[in-house]
Image (spheres, rainbow, N blue to C red):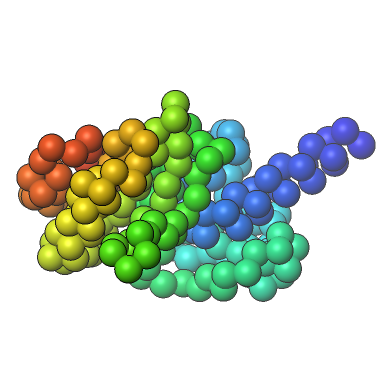
Amino acid sequence: MKKAIEKEQRQEAILSSLAKLDYLTRSQLQILHDLGSPRNTSRVMKSLEPFVAKFLDGEAVYYLTKEGRERTGAKKVRKRTIQARHFIMRNDIYIAFGCPNTWKNEVKLEIKGVVSIVADALFTRDGRYYIVEVDHQQKMSVNKAKIAKYRKMLELGVFKAPPIFIWITTTEHKRKQLLDLCKGMDVKVFLVSEFH
């Protein structure tokens, strides 16, 4: 009986992670839910059909099916898409920073009529905001425009304490460009390769 309850609780926890984080790789699920070996993780995920679907992108990538969304109350429909990599990169940051309970995806920050921006994710720690930005296949001009908006918010004193900006990108060249664009801001730029 105890084992059955534990299994049920683990399944609920995995489904709610997928509802919150949209797409998770096998290795991310392994870390988040302490599932042991890759083989065991795959077995656990197989037992969650028909609530989850998967596709391969380097490794298995899981997301909620219609049944999974109904079971968890998730509203967003996720499908197999090239955009999944963006979510997976964001989730690497979520895991690396210890799965903060204040974490929120796609947060709109704005000063009415002056500046408006949607951060890929945001969380607070020790009274400071951490703003997460994912640069998967973004043009540097788009990143530059985003950074200019954040600078405007900093100038206008929107934040009690200056936020820490966390970027994740794909190449060393892009990391250097982002660090240059963010000069004078409290910023950390990670490469996706640092997590895999």
Based on the displayed image, in which of its 4 quarters is residue 129 positioned?
top left
Which of the pair 94/130 is nearer the observer? Answer: 130
Residue depicted at x 56% and y 38%:
101
Q: Give the total number of marks visible in the rendering.
A: 0
Residue depicted at x 18% and y 62%:
145
Residue depicted at x 66% and y 54%:
15
Which of the pair 86/110 is nearer the observer? Answer: 110
Q: In this image, 148 relative to 160: left or right? A: left
Note whether residue 195 is visible: no
Based on the displayed image, in which of its 4 quarters is residue 139 positioned?
bottom left
Residue depicted at x 53% and y 40%:
102
Residue 33: % across, % down: 60, 38
Residue 154: % across, % down: 25, 45
From this viewpoint, which residue is outermost toward the right?
Answer: 1
Q: Is residue 194 above or below residue 115?
A: above
Based on the displayed image, in which of its 4 quarters is residue 149 positioned?
bottom left
Q: In this image, 13 relative to 157: left or right? A: right
Residue 103: % across, % down: 50, 44
Q: In this image, 65 relative to 116: left or right? A: right
Q: Quadrant of the N terminus?
A: top right
Q: Is residue 99 above or below residue 46?
A: above
Residue 10: % across, % down: 71, 42
Q: Quadrant of the C terminus?
A: top left
Which of the pair 5/145 is nearer the observer? Answer: 145
Note whether residue 146 is visible: yes
